[in-house]
Amino acid sequence: MITVLFFAQLRDQLGCESVSVPAQDIGTLAALRGHLVARNPHWQPHLEADSVLFAVNQTLVKAEHPVRAGDEVAFMPPVTGG
Amino acid sequence: MSEISVQVDRFDAGQEYAALIADDTDGGAAVFFVGRVRARSEGRQVTGLTVEHYPGMTEQALERIVQEARQRWPLQRVRVVHRVGALALGEPIVFVGALSAHRAAAFSAAEFIMDYLKTHAPFWKKERTPEGDVWVNARDSDQQAAQRW
């Protein structure tokens, strides 16, 4: 399984904090996002926004980054700390 | 030596500065920055702030930013403290301190760490306002500030 986390306003927009996704047939983060949007079409504008940041195992990565079973993936809005 | 803390508890900037320079006699230049909760934001009246973060990733991201600063400038000490949870007006949010032999490195490192923290560390602010809670929007000016390094 892949654990997927959502943070801040993205979590509020989706109404969802985390989901678990079976790892088979999912090669990259972009493919994982496609899988999530296929299951939840109303998530599309939020998950596919240009501003969304991605992390795999707590490191910022690009959408082409591979994802594997056991990974922790996060979708995040732009950060606003400091 | 680098110290990084992500914490709920309020900090005292004087005590953080004291810790930054404690027992050190080589750092001739100490620079620190404190970010505070302000009452006005983009024309809105703000009554407080809630800071959310990504536990685990936050600490790693701050560690990476400090390491990057250490590769760029000779630094005796670095200290980064960032609060999470509910904050009241005027309270400190973040402390970044840099200690170096000379001021140029200390000024630059503190500014670099703040610019990178604002664009690379997974914190999100939500403002409390009389009209309800509002997530803070990321600013282009923060991205531009980080890109100049």
Image (cartoon, rainbow, N blue to C red):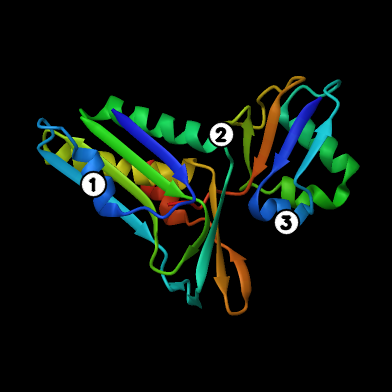
Badge 2 local density, few (<14 within 10 Å), some, or many (20+)?
few
Q: Label 1 crowding class (10 Å Cα cut-off): few <14, some 14-19, many 20+?
A: many
Q: Real-space Cα distance between discs 3 and 2?
A: 21 Å
The mark closer to the camera, 2 or 1, is 1
Residues at marks 2 and 1 touching, judged by CB atoms closer than 8 Å = no
Eyeballing the image, is A63 above or below B107? Answer: above
**Residue B138 position (above or below residue A20):** below
Tell me residue B46's x, y (percent).
50, 73
The residue under label 3 is which amino acid type?
Asp
Q: Chain for mark 2?
A: B
Can the viewer see residue B34? yes
As drawn, is B127 to the left or to the right of A20? Answer: left
Residue B10 shown left or right of residue A56 in the figure: left
The mark found on residue A12 in the picture is: 3
Q: Chain of mark 3?
A: A
Q: Quadrant of residue B90?
A: bottom left
Percent across and percent down for residue A34 are 81, 36
Task: Relative to B88, say whether B107 is above or below.
Answer: above
Q: Amino acid at mark 2?
A: Gly
The reply to the same-chain question for discs 3 and 1 is no
The subunit carrying tag 1 is B
Kindly identify the amino acid type of the residue bearing the numbered disc 1: Tyr
Q: Quadrant of the image for the C terminus of chain B?
A: top left
- B57 shown above or below B95: above
**Number of the front mark, 3 or 2:** 2
Q: Residue at x 36, y 32 (%)?
A: B66
Point out which mark residue B17 bears.
1
- Looking at the picture, tell me which residue is in the foreground, B35 or A14: B35
Q: Quadrant of the N terminus of chain B?
A: top left
